Image: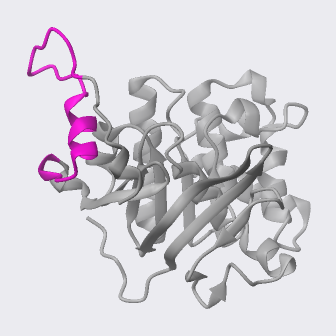
Amino acid sequence: MSEQTTSPKLQVEDLNVRFATGEGLVHAVRGVSFDLGREKLAIVGESGSGKSTVGRTLLRLHPRSARIEAKKLRFGDTDLLTCSEKKLQDIRGRRMSMIMQDPKYSLNPVMRVGDQIAEAYLAHHKVPRSEANQRALAMLEAVRIREPQRVFKLYPHEVSGGMGQRIMIAMMLITEPEIVIADEPTSALDVSVRLQVLATLDDLVSQRGLGLIFISHDLNLVRSFCDRVLVMYAGRVVESIAAADLENAQHPYTRGLLASLPSIDERRERLPVLQRDPAWAMA
């Protein structure tokens, strides 16, 4: 397990996010707090629990109508709540990157993938295009893509889902960020390809000493891949626990999620339905 540094890379305290709608304000994230060091931190929960909203808030990717409040939202020595857009642009993509869920919707369909990776580097470094291209080729090798020179010239529709996800990882890591936010990066992949992509991401995180926020709904996956787990329900963190100790989780919501997972070792005619308590959203 990676050790969390004594001085965390990221500090989040009492984060609240609200969105304006036609029916009033929707309180999407409620009082979320955590620190992130050199570790793999999972944020799990059902769809609509607020986990992706937390990830996007860190990079201020929400519309201007979003109301973001926190006692502390600090990345190193930078206050993410009050820093200028210019300062944020220097952080976003360069020091903190986000791997999106599906490369089909994140890659530009009319640009060759190598040019897109090189462009991510050029956005933050004033170097010749030739140097950026060489760095892009090196990143394609780092994410275990065979024949990187051939793949460099392909368009997104010419690569498989697994290769597309590796390309996204290469694009987000070419700037050598300190923190990577991965928003369900393997949900669209089959099991064998998923394991390959996770192994690649794990190696890169370990080698570079990154902090990783891994957003997922898959408890079995984060149990084996991450160091710590935050379990979210209705915008709140209801439990924080070491990934290796998930079987000993105490909150009834976490216990319900675990009980609803199928198992090859235990045959059950019907998986239990998660029973939700309205009090969980208020605790």
Q: Give residue 181's quadrant in the image.
A: bottom right
Q: Position of residue 89 (x, y in %)?
A: 81, 72
Q: Position of residue 138 (x, y in %)?
A: 65, 54
Q: What residue lies at 64% left-to-right and 74% top-to-bottom?
A: 69
The range drawn in magenta is 247-272
From the viewer's perspective, is 32 left or right of 133? left
From the viewer's perspective, is 269 left or right of 76? left
Q: Is residue 252 above or below residue 91?
A: above
Q: Main secondary structure of the magenta part?
A: loop
Q: Does residue 268 belong to the magenta stretch?
A: yes
Q: Is residue 33 above or below residue 121?
A: below
Q: Quadrant of the C terminus?
A: bottom left
- Closest to the observer: 221 or 193? 221
Q: Does residue 131 belong to the magenta stretch?
A: no
Q: Is residue 78 above or below residue 238?
A: below
Q: What residue lies at 51% left-to-right and 36% top-to-bottom?
A: 47
- Residue 229 showing in the rendered view: no
Q: What residue lies at 29% left-to-right and 30% top-to-bottom?
A: 274
